[in-house]
């Protein structure tokens, strides 16, 4: 039987936090949320139990409920009472900043029991001081310092003459960066955290010196005591509340980088992202084009082994040559397959039902075998290094450098092993498998990808069995008026420990806002005709904007058509996603509106979620088309194919509810406070004219709904 935590203590903390909040307005939904959390989680078992009691509370909290105050106050109080910790996982940096800079300090100021909170980051956000020392002033050859495929290709005389004036040499730029970072560390003006630098380094420059698991000997490293990453880990160990992100939580399963999930209370805020993050975490990919690192691999293994007096059990030179040849052969076959489909060099081709063509089976089998043998040799050598460092501390520094030399090779080999194994796997529930060619780097590159197709299975297998007390919350967990889709996607359906609650927003949408659906003559499925008509309507509506507006597009082609159609009166008012940084765009928009000017933001999917534009900053949201996902996404394609084979309807099961969630997010940009007045204008008549459109409407806030016809705008009976 689990120890019971008195609900009154957790709710008292909730009341304390609210009482100390300036200008607080009582919200019944917020208290409902706090009470559900306490009721659901107060009896969960933490730690070792033969039959542990679990609870997972799934709570949709509409905009303005104040969900972070509800879950932080109650869970922190419960955790302090039970002498455990709270792990809060988010999907965005913006929410992490809100929690760490506003919500947690406010709670700490009012609770009787003090607590410490901290932010958890992955290793790659911290510098490896040993690598940095190796890179600065070492006099090492460039090939020892940089990854072989990061080095610029030798330039011909013509190319040297064509160098852009003032263009920095990449190698010289990197060395200057490393010298600067070393100087800052020595002067104690930098803590080794990439995010605390004034100017963020280029990803390629940073990756060479980033701390990462495969090149770390942990306590055997001579810099362990002042390692930036392990110093941060020490701070985490002292914290009762840890803020992380979904990627890190899933990537850390079984690695002891975060608190054991069966010994703490866990929150997934922005929880609707969990299924997508799970798919990403358990996917695999390998590069079939850039293979120069393979030429370096045997030299590195042999050099390290010789310096240790260690005898390699495999002929790594031959194995690397064989792997190189097999990868090259697979690349040639893959490009031939793609050329048969399209002359374009920017192409994605998925293998139907997850089955490889016969011509690829043998090359992929060879790739898997050669990569596995090399990976095992590399792992054995790494294990020997760590063993010797433990047995002979005097050699730890030298051995740590040798281990760091091997580090970059392990994840590359690992990705080849994982991808090839997945490519050769075929089960009743197939994997999505595809080839991708693109020219974004200026050269044609080819990569192979594999991914599971049902995120709920992954979460059920890897996550939910590990947890004891969890709150999953977001403003968009339900779709079309129920939780069925999220529960299925997240692997929570039919689990007896799961409870759901929908907490309504305190906003009066019926009086604060309108949802207007404009009728077009063209069918939205007829892209060119619809886009022409929609853009003409959009320009007319934009001409009436007096303060802030947000236009959301479903494709870049569609957005470009609207931008190209802007006249001289509207063009200066429009800020387009991608033409400047998001921070600069938002600052410009706010400055314009606050100075009394009209300002219009053009954005894509990422601007439809998490964009907080209260009051005059967004009085109109214009949705150009229902936000269906791209029909060519290989994972969604593979899943739809699998469902059809079972006699099921992927449009009803997947497409409609997923689109309903995105539509709820997009319309949620309009009303952000109790005082806002805003209008949502949708140009897709399917929202009112189809059964699935009306299903989506059931999941939206209770706006007053209108239909705009050529003859005028009329209310829609029964939907107000």
Image (cartoon, helix red, strand yellow):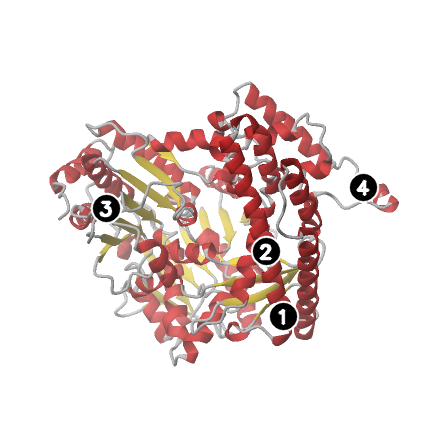
Q: Within 10 angstroms of label 2, few (less than 14), some, or many (20 or more) residues? A: some
In whole angstroms, how far apart are the C-alphas of marks 4 and 1? 44 Å
Say what secondary structure mark 2 lies in: helix
| Residue visible at 60% across and 57% down in the picture | 371
Q: Within 10 angstroms of label 4, few (less than 14), some, or many (20 or more) residues? A: few
* Residue receiving disc 2: 373
Q: Is residue 285 above or below residue 63?
A: below
Instruction: Please state which of the two labelled residues, at mark 2 or mark 3, is closer to the viewer.
Output: 2
Instruction: Please state which of the two labelled residues, at mark 3 or mark 4, is closer to the viewer.
Output: 3
Q: Position of residue 530 (x, y in %)?
A: 53, 70
Say what secondary structure mark 4 lies in: loop
* Residue receiving disc 4: 163
In whole angstroms, how far apart are the C-alphas of marks 2 and 4? 43 Å
Q: Is residue 641 above or below residue 102?
A: below
Q: Residue 48 shows which numbered tag?
A: 3
Say what secondary structure mark 1 lies in: helix
Q: Earlier in the sequence, mark 3 or mark 4?
A: 3
In whole angstroms, how far apart are the C-alphas of marks 2 and 3? 39 Å
In whole angstroms, how far apart are the C-alphas of marks 3 and 4? 64 Å
Q: Earlier in the sequence, mark 2 or mark 3?
A: 3
| Residue visible at 35% across and 61% down in the picture | 515
Q: Position of residue 574 (x, y in %)?
A: 54, 49
């Amino acid at each position: 039987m689990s120890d019971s935590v008195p609900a009154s203590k957790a709710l008292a903390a909730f009341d304390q936090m609210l009482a100390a909040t300036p200008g607080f307005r009582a919200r019944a939904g917020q208290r409902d949320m706090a009470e559900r959390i306490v009721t659901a989680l107060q009896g969960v078992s933490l730690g070792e139990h033969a039959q542990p009691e679990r609870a997972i509370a799934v709570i949709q909290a509409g905009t303005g409920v104040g969900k972070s105050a509800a879950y932080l106050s109650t869970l922190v109080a419960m955790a302090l009472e039970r002498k455990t910790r709270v792990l809060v996982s988010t999907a965005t940096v913006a929410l992490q900043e809100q929690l760490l800079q506003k919500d947690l300090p406010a709670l700490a100021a009012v609770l009787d029991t003090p607590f410490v909170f901290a932010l958890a980051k992955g290793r790659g956000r911290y510098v490896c001081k040993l690598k940095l020392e190796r890179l600065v002033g070492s006099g090492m050859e460039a090939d020892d310092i940089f990854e072989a495929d990061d080095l610029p290709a030798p330039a011909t005389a013509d190319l040297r003459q064509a160098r852009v004036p003032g263009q920095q040499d990449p190698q010289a730029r990197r060395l200057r960066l490393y010298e600067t970072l070393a100087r800052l560390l020595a002067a104690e003006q930098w803590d080794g955290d990439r995010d605390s630098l004034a100017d963020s380094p280029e990803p390629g420059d940073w990756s060479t010196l980033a701390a990462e698991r495969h090149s770390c000997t942990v306590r055997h490293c001579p810099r362990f005591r002042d390692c930036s990453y392990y110093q941060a880990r020490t701070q985490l160990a002292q914290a009762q509340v840890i803020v992380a992100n979904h990627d890190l939580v899933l990537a850390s399963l079984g690695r002891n980088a975060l608190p054991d999930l069966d010994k703490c209370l866990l929150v997934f805020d922005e929880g609707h992202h969990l299924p997508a993050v799970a798919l990403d975490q358990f996917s695999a990919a390998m590069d079939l084009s850039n293979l120069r690192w393979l030429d370096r691999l045997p030299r590195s293994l042999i050099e390290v082994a010789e310096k240790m007096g260690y005898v390699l059990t495999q002929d790594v030179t031959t194995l690397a040559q064989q792997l190189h040849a097999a990868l090259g052969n697979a690349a040639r076959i893959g490009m031939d397959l793609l050329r048969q489909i399209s002359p374009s060099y920017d192409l994605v081709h998925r293998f139907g039902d997850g089955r490889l063509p016969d011509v690829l089976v043998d090359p992929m089998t060879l790739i898997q075998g050669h990569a596995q043998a090399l990976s095992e040799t590399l792992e054995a050598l790494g294990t020997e290094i760590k063993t010797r460092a433990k047995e002979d501390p005097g050699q730890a520094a030298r051995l740590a450098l040798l281990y760091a030399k091997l580090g970059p090779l392990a994840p590359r080999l690992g990705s080849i092993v994982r991808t090839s194994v997945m490519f050769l796997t075929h089960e009743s529930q197939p994997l999505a498998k595809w080839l991708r060619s693109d020219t974004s780097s200026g050269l044609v590159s080819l990569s192979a990808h594999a991914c599971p197709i049902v995120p709920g299975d992954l979460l059920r297998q890897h996550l939910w069995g590990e947890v004891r007390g969890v709150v999953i919350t977001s403003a968009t967990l339900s779709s079309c008026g129920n939780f069925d889709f999220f529960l299925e996607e997240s692997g929570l359906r039919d689990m007896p420990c799961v409870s759901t609650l929908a907490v309504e927003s305190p906003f009066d949408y019926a009086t604060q806002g309108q949802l207007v659906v404009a009728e077009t003559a063209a069918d939205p499925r007829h892209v060119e005709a619809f886009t022409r008509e929609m853009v003409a309507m959009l320009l007319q509506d934009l001409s009436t904007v007096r303060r802030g507006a947000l236009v959301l597009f479903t494709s870049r082609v569609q957005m470009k058509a609207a931008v190209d159609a802007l006249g001289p009166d509207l063009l200066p008012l429009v800020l387009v996603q991608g033409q400047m940084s998001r921070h600069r765009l938002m600052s410009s928009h706010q400055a314009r509106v606050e100075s009394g000017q009209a300002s219009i933001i053009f954005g894509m999917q990422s601007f439809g979620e998490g964009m907080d534009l209260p009051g005059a900053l967004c009085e109109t949201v214009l949705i150009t088309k229902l936000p269906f996902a791209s029909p060519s996404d290989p994972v969604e394609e593979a899943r739809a194919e699998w469902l059809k084979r079972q006699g099921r309807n992927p449009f009803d099961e997947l497409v409609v509810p997923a689109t309903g969630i995105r539509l709820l997010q997009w319309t949620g940009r309009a009303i952000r406070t109790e005082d806002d007045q805003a209008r949502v204008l949708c140009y897709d008549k399917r929202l009112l004219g189809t059964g699935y459109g009306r299903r989506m409407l059931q999941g939206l806030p209770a706006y007053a709904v209108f239909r705009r016809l050529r003859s005028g705008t009329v209310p829609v009976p029964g939907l107000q």
